[in-house]
Image (cartoon, rainbow, N blue to C red):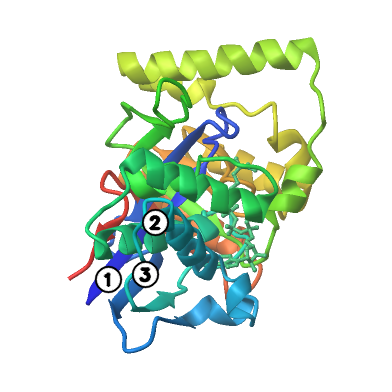
């Protein structure tokens, strides 16, 4: 029996809409992600979805993105004149849906990594990642790799999408803490994309180029103050913040408590704050727990970048 865990991810990191993403894990060692289990089966294919958030998923198995991952994997294998083996596949759906934590990416990545391992790895990393992007695109309406890439490969990934690479790892600041606060409400990625403008002013384009270029430069030269200052979002945050409860006020409070940067995780409603040390992280986490959560489904985790990405459990 094979069990694959795929971690939560925070896409965009404010400054890299659709081009930057980080894999994330809580520092207390808890698992924040989905798990796929695969085992030999008497019938050709059996699929089951279990876990706390399974009740929020479509009832029809064909609509589950994990089922679709199996179909896509089988089709691609057939193109190589190979057959998928009989298997029983179980999804443990631990991630809230429409959270901004890459919930669909967790399911897609865990499923494809498990299927690939179960078949003695017929596909390369980039071939698998291309399939992951295709499945993610079915959900959000357009292909973007900024959740699936870090979730699969770990670390902070920059989407180069050139010269045979979909993404490359960016050096980051290992001592930074990420405080992630999920308020417990749902924001659909497709809807959060639909409200963005179709075009931007020249001034926004110049600012975006300066911030993203400055951020990548600061990561490579390990200038953490510059990196934090460059984490500004002119593409999505001005339009999406209305979807998040009291975002502007809460962001200001996190900055006042010592956060280096605060923004929307992916398409929201989770927000993230970067803290330079555990003391600031704990203060920000306490504040967000009291002022950002909307119901008892919400949670706050103090995290670090997960450098491993998807992995086998046990
Ligand atoms: N296994 C699955 N996990 C998550 N969502 C799924 C899954 N299967 C199907 N879906 C559907 O995909 C959509 C996921 O929505 P959305 O992309 O907004 O969520 P998300 O992946 O959590 O977002 P984000 O990437 O911002 O964290 C929902 O309509 C959900 O029903
Ligand atoms: N880059 C995507 C991530 C979605 O999680 C967006 O912001 O729409």
Mark 2: few/some/many CA within 10 Å (<14, 14-19, 20+) = some
How many angstroms separate mark 1 from mark 2 (CA)?
21 Å
**Who comes first in sequence, dot 3 or dot 1?**
1
| Residue that badge 2 annotates | 77
The percent coordinates of residue 190 (x first, y second) are 72, 51
Quadrant the N terminus occupies: bottom left
Q: Is residue 250 left or right of residue 310?
A: right
Work out whether 138 lies above or below 165: below
- Distance between mark 3 and mark 1 Cα atoms: 7 Å
- Where is 94 relative to 283, above or below? below
Q: Tell whether label 1 touches label 3 (CB within 8 Å).
A: yes
Q: Which residue is mark 3?
A: 35
Residue that mark 1 sits on? 3
Q: Secondary structure at mark 3?
A: strand
Q: Between 254 and 78, which is closer to the camera in this rendering? A: 78
Residue 130 in view (yes/no): yes
Q: Position of residue 103 (x, y in %)?
A: 52, 60
């Amino acid at each position: 029996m094979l069990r694959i865990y795929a971690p939560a991810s925070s896409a965009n990191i404010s400054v890299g809409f659709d081009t930057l993403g980080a894999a994330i894990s809580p520092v207390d060692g808890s698992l924040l992600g989905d798990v796929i289990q695969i085992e030999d089966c008497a019938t050709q294919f059996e699929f089951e979805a279990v876990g706390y958030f399974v009740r929020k998923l479509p009832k029809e198995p064909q609509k589950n993105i994990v089922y679709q991952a199996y179909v896509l994997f089988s089709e691609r294998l057939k193109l190589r004149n190979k057959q998928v083996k009989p298997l029983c596949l179980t999804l443990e759906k631990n991630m809230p849906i429409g959270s901004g934590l890459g919930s669909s990416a967790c399911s897609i990545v865990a499923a494809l990594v498990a299927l690939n391992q179960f078949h003695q790895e017929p596909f390369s990393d980039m071939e698998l990642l291309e399939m992951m992007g295709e499945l993610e695109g079915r959900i959000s309406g357009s292909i973007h790799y900024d959740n699936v890439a870090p979730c699969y490969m770990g670390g902070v990934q920059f989407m180069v999408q050139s010269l045979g690479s979909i993404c490359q790892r960016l050096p980051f600041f290992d001592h930074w803490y990420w405080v992630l606060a999920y308020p417990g409400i749902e924001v659909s990625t497709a809807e959060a994309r639909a409200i963005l403008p179709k075009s931007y002013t020249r001034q926004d384009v110049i600012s975006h180029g300066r911030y993203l270029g400055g951020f990548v430069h600061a990561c490579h030269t390990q200038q953490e103050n510059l990196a934090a200052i460059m984490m500004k979002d002119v593409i999505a945050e001005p339009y999406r913040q209305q979807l998040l409860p009291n975002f502007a006020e809460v962001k200001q409070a996190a900055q006042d408590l010592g956060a280096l940067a605060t923004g929307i995780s992916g398409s929201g409603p989770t927000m993230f704050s970067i803290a330079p040390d555990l003391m600031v992280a704990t203060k920000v986490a306490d504040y967000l727990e009291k002022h950002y959560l909307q119901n008892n489904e919400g949670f706050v985790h103090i995290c670090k970048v997960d450098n491993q990405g998807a992995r086998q459990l046990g």
